[in-house]
Each structure stands twice: as C-alpha cells, then as structure tokens.
Amino acid sequence: MAIARTPEEEQAVKDSLISICAEVFFRDGYSSATMKSLSEEAGCTTGKFYSNFTGKPEILRILIGKLVNLNYHEAAKLMTPEDAPIMQMIYFFLLEYEICHVNDKLCELFYYAYEDSDGVRAVAEQMKPEFGRLLEESYGKKEEDGVLMAKSAMNFNILRSIIVGERSGYGFGNEQQQIAVLTDILLASIGIDGKNADKIRKQIEKQAPAFRDATYNLIIRILQNGLD
C-alpha cells in the first residue's frame, strides 16, 4: 500500500520535476522536449509526470511564472534614486525583451508561452497587482481592475509581437528601434508623454550598458542555477 504524501512532499516532488524540465528546455529547447524525454531525464515513468502535470503547456506556464517573477526582481536592481517606482515595470519589460533577443532557448520559451491569448492573459494577470501598486505609488492614482488588466495585457501583447517577429525572421528594425517602440507603448499605457516621456527615454538610453550586463548575468544565472 502506497504511503500518502503530505502536501509539502507533493510540492517538493513537483518542484524537483520542474527544475529538471527547466534544465532540459534551457539545454535542448522547449519544442524538442517530450513528456517521454523529460521523464527519462528525471529517471521516472511518464505516468509519474502526468500524475503531476497535464502536459508540457502546464509545465511551461509554471516556468514562465517563475521567469517573470525573477525578471521583475532583477529589474528592481536597475532602479536609480531618481526613478519613479513605475520604472521598475518598464525595466522589467525591457529585460524580458533583451533576454529573448540574446538567448534562443529562452526566447523559445516565451514564444510558446505567449503563443495564444490565454498565455498572455495568465502572465498579465500575474503582473497586474504589481503594475497597479507601482502606478499608485508613482502618481497617487488607483486604477480600476479592468483598466489595469487591459494595460498589462497590452504591454505583454506588444512584447509577444516582437518575440514572434524575432523567431520568424520578420521582425521590424534593429534592436535599438525595437526597444524604442516597446518603450513608447509602455509609456503610452502608463499615460506618460511630452517632456516626462523624453526624460524616461534618455534614462533608458543611459541605462543601456546596465541592461546588457543585467541580461547576460541573469541568463548565466538561469542556465547555471535554474530558477530557484
């Protein structure tokens, strides 16, 4: 008779399998992996994987949630004393873009995660509370839930469009132009224009070397240590 695991033990097993999946996806790519190859890598049966996850899409959603959370906290390290709190969200989106621009395997993960509206909605929902908090701290205005969701989803949708362009070979412009477009859309969603927008654009240009260093350091950390 099998001994029933506690919820903590069940979560530990799940976390261990997720870590193995991350290693495989980062090494071989998401599209190349199968539930069979993932179970072989983990040294367990395919049935054990299916008893924990419904399939690769569920594993991907969990991984992207972890990646998004990690990127958001890394974005905080790019903040300067003169930055308004909302800049953390702008830095976060630009870090997401840079990671996809630099690393093919991570770009593939985001590509499949944002492939449909459900994927975009899930990550927009995840980031919505922080988006609202940063807006309120920056401008003293509390946005309605539906407005926040729409703004958050719009930003992820434009990021998705750029990632799709990167992977399909039909992307517009160069890296600098794509960052400029993403920045303009982020500013528009927040409601920043005129001189304030120009100031932020200059700050982002000034931060370009820091973005690049943060991107490479983050990728190295992810590939060496996973998402823990």
Image (cartoon, grey):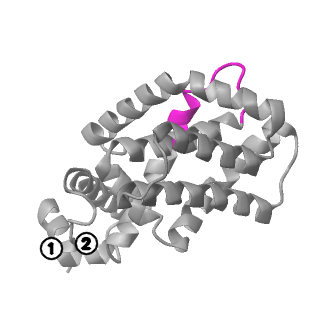
Of the residues shown, which amino acid type is indicated by label 1? Thr
Q: Quick one: label 2, few (<14), some, or many (20+) residues within 10 Å? A: many
Q: Are marks 2 and 1 in contact (CB under 8 Å)?
A: yes
Q: Residue at x 67, y 57 (%)?
A: 152
Q: Residue at x 35, y 64 (%)?
A: 10
Q: Quadrant of the N terminus?
A: bottom left
Q: Closer to the camera, 147 or 100?
A: 100
Q: Quadrant of the C terminus?
A: top left
Give the vertical position of 116 relative to 127 (above or below).
below
Q: Residue tagged by mark 2? A: 49
Give the spatial CA distance, label 2 vs label 1: 7 Å
Q: Main secondary structure of the magenta part?
A: loop
Left/right of residue 177 with respect to residue 196 in the rendered view? left
* Circle on res. 213: none
Give the vertical position of 207 relative to 182 (above or below).
above
In magenta, the rendered stretch is 71-85
* Circle on res. 45: 1
